[in-house]
Image: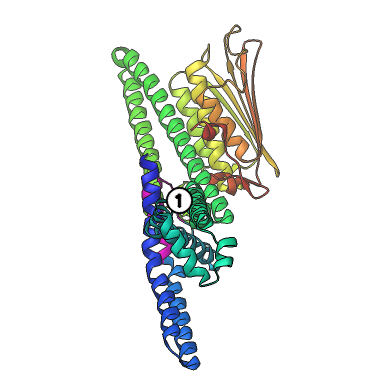
Amino acid sequence: MAKLWRRLLVLLIGGVIAVPYAAVVIWAVTASDRVGNRADSLTIIVVGIIAFALLCVPAFLAVIRALERTLAEQLLELSIPTPPRRPRTADRLRGALFYFGHTFAGALLLLTIVVLVPAAVVLVGDPGQAHELSDGLIGTDTSLAATVLPAGLIQTLAVGILLMCIAIIVVEGYFLPNYALILLGPSAADRAELAGRERARRFRRTVLAREVHDSIGHALTVTTMQAAVAKRALQRDPTIAEAAVDEIARTGREAVAELDHVLALLRTEADLEADDDAVIGAETAQQPRRTREDIEVLAEEARSVGHSTQLRISGDIGSLPAAVAHELHRIVREALTNSLRHASEPGASVSISVDARVVTLTVINACAVNTGGARSNAGAGRGLQGIKERVELFGGDVRWTADGGSWTLEAVLPTARGTAAHTGTATTGGTVRVTNEERQT
């Protein structure tokens, strides 16, 4: 019932808007009828048409379209997206079409309430009034009045016109929200653009969440193990304990720096009002360029907690695009973190091969024979799923297997797509690729 009253209120507002238009038309018609001079009558009609046309100008203004959109959102309980750009001619025409439709529907509602309903009640309730109306229409030709416009026909026409107007009003009220969404909302191209921006925004947030998970997870794993090393060596070898504490401090500082980086990107996105190019540019500018030494530091971190790690690098990591080197560093870090957490025996082997087309990473560590093998790529945890997403952003391939008591992770990253992957909006044929994690968000 509340919805019905709100829709009637919207139509009544349209009727109020229609009053000036009706007043101009009535004035022009009545004034021209009173004037005997044909030239003066024509002048009055022309003036009326000009006044009517001037009243139509607001229908094409952007502010009127915005007011109509606000009215529809508040009273029709709609959520109409704001177009991503200034209105074009087609948008103004659609807004004007809704304005005139709204005005016509409101005028019809007012006419029905103020004129048709009372007239139908009077004509049906008082047949004498119907006879008088029939005589007034036909004049003195009583035979024509009896055959063409009898009183019963007048009553039937009045009721029929009333019912027809009511039916039109009901249909208008029913479809009013649909017309508002179509005519006041963004065009099909604008909706596609808004959807693309929302997918890119959600995707970028997923990437940032993965960065937080990987960096904080790695830092917590390393610091926990370093704390255990410090505790064991505190009595027998204070030098080792001191080195472990220093490593905890260094790892903590790096984690805080990466967390600040992610938070800065989130603030940048809010400050720039989701300007994709500006946010991506800010993200690219703030990311450090990863080198061979950074990967060697990861291996040394693992060794410092008793996880003997063999690192073999063939090729020049410095020749990789910055984005590829950055993601390679992230993948190696997450792979070593998983090895520290889940390896059945301390130790890991990391091999990196760089050539002109691809960079290949292989990480091997021990695992229990009765575990791990049942885990598939589809059922991987957050860390492995994050690695999979990073590699797929480049159009690369990643797989992991457990065989003969060893866990093997293999990743191949093409080097030509580094920039697209680094921005967090990988493109394939001009479309944004959305990850499984984003679809579940």
Q: Residue furthest top?
A: 370
Q: Which residues lie in the magenta part?
A: 63-82
Marks counted in the figure total 1
Q: Which residue is mark 1?
A: 80
Camera-nearest residue between 353 and 27: 27
Residue kind at label 1, given as amino acid type: Ile
Residue at screen point 51% across, 38% down: 293
Q: Quadrant of residue 316?
A: top right
Asked if residue 341 is positioned above or below residue 438 in the image, the reply reads above
Of 138 and 348, the residue lying toward us: 138
| Image coordinates for residue 56, horizontal then vertical, percent | 45, 72
| Residue depicted at x 66% and y 36% | 396
How far across and down, in percent of the image, does residue 265 sit? 41, 46
Q: Check the image and tell me how it is coloured.
A: rainbow
Helix, strand or loop at label 1? It is loop
Going 49% across and 64% down the picture, which residue do you hit? Answer: 134
Question: How far from the left and from the top, in percent, is residue 336?
Answer: 52, 25
Q: Quadrant of the N terminus?
A: top left
On the image, the x and y values in percent for residue 342 come to 50, 16
Q: Dot 1, crowdedness within 10 Å: few (<14), some or many (≥20)?
A: some
